[in-house]
Image (tube, rainbow, N blue to C red):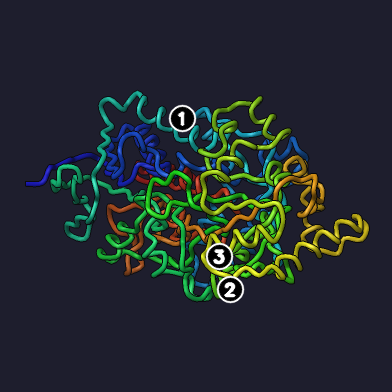
Amino acid sequence: MPKEYQSDIIIVGGGIAGITTAIELLNFNKKVLIIDRDTQDNFGGLAKESFGGMFFVDTPQQRRSGIKDSPELAFSDWCSVANFGNEDVLPKQWAKQYVYHGTSKVYDWLKKQGISFFPVVHWVERGLFKPGNSVPRFHMVWGTGAELTKVLNNKLLNHPNAPDNLNVVYGHKVEELIADDQKIVGVSGIIEAEEQPFKATGAQIVIAAGGLGGNIKKVRDNWYSPWGKPPEVILNGAHKYALGDMHDAVARKEGVVTHLDKNWPYAAGVHHPRPKKEGHGLSLVPPKSALWLDYTGKRFGPIPLITAFDTRWTVEEICKQEKKYSWQILNMTIAHKEFAISGAESNKAIRDKSWIGFVKTILFGNKELVKDMIDNCIDFVTADNLEELVNKMNGLTGTDDVKLAHVKEGVEAYDAQIDRGPKFYNDDQLRRIAHVRKYKGDKVRTCKFQKIVDAKAGKLMAIREHILSRKTLGGIQTNLDCQVMGNNQQPMAGLFAVGEVAGFGGGGMHGLGTLEGTFLGGCVLTGRVAAYAIAGKKLIK
């Protein structure tokens, strides 16, 4: 016999979207059961490992820095990157809802929970061939996603209504939705450690199970077709249980699941030196002063690859190659100044909220992180000269793909440009470095026109970079109350979806691409909207 649970509301998934939904439902004195597949120690989902950046418009941080922003400008930027189709009615409505209400309904709400944000706003996804973020909007949680998760977990578990109204179970894999007379009334699955079936019933079911980026087979099956065949190696930067199971379960009940090919991979993935899952990868913040080369050692061009402008285009350029991975070449001076890895694990000073540690990193570089990756990550090689470096690059791949002539041509041409002096720079990478250094948030983290071959800059370094799976931009289609839409174009009674499983709203509020920082924010906003709707109220009026 299956083990049985009953509650007012069943939430499938214990990430930030599910936790936010539960907090608000407890505020409405609802009885809540959260069903999570992971262990109690990992409660909080992928947000716990994240860098903690969040997209907001017209905030105090922006105004204090003299950044003039508005929802109108931000929505124009969003639509430029999203490239919505005529059929994307709900995704576009969700995008507008996030842009116009994210600051009041997410930023302000998080501040009230005890979350603080770094005073300097980061500027990412600036746009390359079309507008991206016209101004900086990437607000870093002080303490990274680890702090965000910790604060919201504490708010949930210590909620005044939690003793009577909250139950959280772990190690439970949900497999199916239970329907009764056209209404979703529960879920069923397996308690994995005990191999015992279970079912849980409630008045409303909220799916908060994440995307499908942790299922590399599904990533391949849903690969964006204009990019050709998927890469031979795709590293896993998503949650280990972001497997797409609940997308399938909803589809089996004739719910709409859409745009699963609109994924958001990163271009600079490397193998985790201490992997916790198969193909575990880390997402580098690629050094802007490094040269980005294809698998043969040829510099990408005529437009060189450089981070912070257009992630999707960068992935697309790499995927045009016969072998869909790349290299970056740099030296120790560049590495110590610019090298970073996205995520809480690799940013100790910010994660631990240490201002002294953060200032030391800015002044002296993150030498500890650089050394760890050189010593322990298989994708890093160092050498005293280009010939030795190319030999080690080929040794790493077991091929002779990297051609010394290609590497020399790119490096020597770039270094020669720097030797001419800033007045004569005619290299697009140098022009963009000059541009990013005009903003204070980037100047302190970007070298001032550093050559690659430079006796004073230390050893040369090459980093092999794979495409890394991260976020699923499509998902379960929802209306503006987070109700799951059925194939009959009507909301499915009793069923809601929040966070990444819903494409962060509407089945894909980002369209083709994202301005970044909208993933965590989308989880919080959808969670709050769903809770209010379940309580018969409107968060956004």
Q: Which residue is mark 3?
A: 325
**Residue type pointed to by label 2:** Gln
Q: Which residue is mark 2?
A: 321
522 relative to 177 in the view: left or right: right
Quadrant assignment, res 15 = top left
Q: Which residue is mark 1?
A: 151
Residue mark closest to the camera, 3 vs 1: 3
Check whether the beta carbons of the residues at disc 1 and disc 2 lie within 8 A of each other.
no
Residue mark closest to the camera, 1 vs 2: 2
308 relative to 444 in the view: left or right: left
Percent across and percent down for residue 506 are 45, 59
Check whether the beta carbons of the residues at disc 3 and disc 1 lie within 8 A of each other.
no
Q: Judging from the image, what secondary structure is the residue with disc 3 in?
A: strand
**x 65%, y 45%: residue:** 339
Percent across and percent down for residue 60 are 68, 35
Pick whichever, 76 or 320, lies toward us.
Answer: 320
Q: Judging from the image, what secondary structure is the residue with disc 1 in?
A: helix
**x 59%, y 71%: residue:** 401
Q: Callout 3: few (<14), some (14-19), or many (20+) C-alpha neighbours within 10 Å?
A: many
Percent across and percent down for residue 397 are 53, 63
Check whether the beta carbons of the residues at disc 3 and disc 2 lie within 8 A of each other.
no
Q: CA distance from mark 3 to mark 2?
A: 8 Å
Q: CA distance from mark 1 to mark 2?
A: 44 Å
**Residue type pointed to by label 1:** Val
**Residue type pointed to by label 3:** Tyr
**x 60%, y 26%: residue:** 354
